[in-house]
Structure formats: structure tokens, C-alpha cells
Image (cartoon, rainbow, N blue to C red):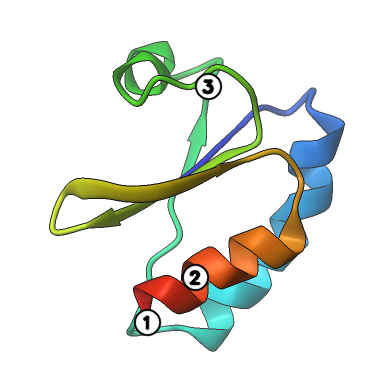
Amino acid sequence: VDFWAEWCGPCLQLAPILDEIAEEMDGKLKVCKVDVDSNMESAQRFGVRGIPYIVLLKDGQQVDSVTGNDPSRVKALAQQAA
């Protein structure tokens, strides 16, 4: 789950990388985007303190997360899910 906002520069920079991951791992991993301005309740539920905030869920449970624009950590998180 990608927690982001339209006004967040680092979020916008990370978006193409997440799109690439979603395409490469189609069928193994699903990337969902949550706009924190429109979905504050979801952001609070996951304890989002800064964005971009990427959460890895497996069977509905949070397994790991990455805060900030760190493409290598986000890619590693995706590999962990595969």
C-alpha cells in the first residue's frame, strides 16, 4: 500500500517506480495507492507519520514498511513479498 498525496514531491518521484514494480510483479504483488488527504482514517489506522509510506501486507497483516523516497528499499520490500 502506497500512502501518498498530490502535493508530496517525493511521492510523485516514487510513483513511476511503484508502477514498474506493479507491472513486473503482476500476479505476485498488488500495489494499491491511498491518498492520505482523502483517506485520513486509513492513514491513521496504519500509523502513517510521513509520506511516502509504503506498507507490505500479507494475508491482511502488516509485514514491513518503508518511509520516504528510497527506491532500493521499496524494491527490496517488493522482492520480500514475492
| 72 sits left or right of 80 in the view | right
Position of residue 26 relative to residue 2, above or below, is below
Q: Is residue 44 left or right of residue 4?
A: left
Residue bearing mark 1 = 82
Residue located at (33% from left, 13% from top): 41
Regarding residue 23, the answer to whether it shows in the image is yes
Density class for disc 3 (Cα within 10 Å; few <14, some 14-19, many ≥20) is some
Please say if the residues under marks 1 and 2 sit with CB atoms less than 8 Å apart: yes
Q: Amino acid at mark 3?
A: Val
- Considering only vertical position in the picture, is 12 above or below 22? above
For badge 1, the amino acid type reads Ala
Of badges 2 and 3, nearer the viewer stands 2
At horizontal 57% and vertical 70% (from top left) the residue drawn is: 76
Estimate the spatial distance between the alpha carbons at disc 3 and disc 1, rounded to whole Å: 26 Å
Q: Residue at x 43, y 13 (%)?
A: 40
- Residue 77, image x and y in percent? 51, 64
Which residue bears the numbered disc 2?
78
- Amino acid type of the residue that numbered disc 2 sits on in the rendered structure: Ala
Residue 4, image quadrant: top right
The answer to whether residue 55 is seen in the rendering is no
Are the residues flagged by discs 3 and 1 in contact, CB closer than 8 Å? no
Q: Position of residue 33 (x, y in %)?
A: 50, 45
Residue 61, how many percent across, how many down? 18, 47
Secondary structure under badge 2? helix
Q: CA distance from mark 2 to mark 3?
A: 21 Å
> Which SS class for mark 1?
loop
Task: Measure the C-alpha gap from mark 1 to mark 2.
Answer: 7 Å
Q: Is residue 2 left or right of residue 40?
A: right
Q: Is residue 6 above or below residue 19?
A: above
The residue indicated by pointer 3 is 36
In the rendered image, the residue lying farthest to the left is 59
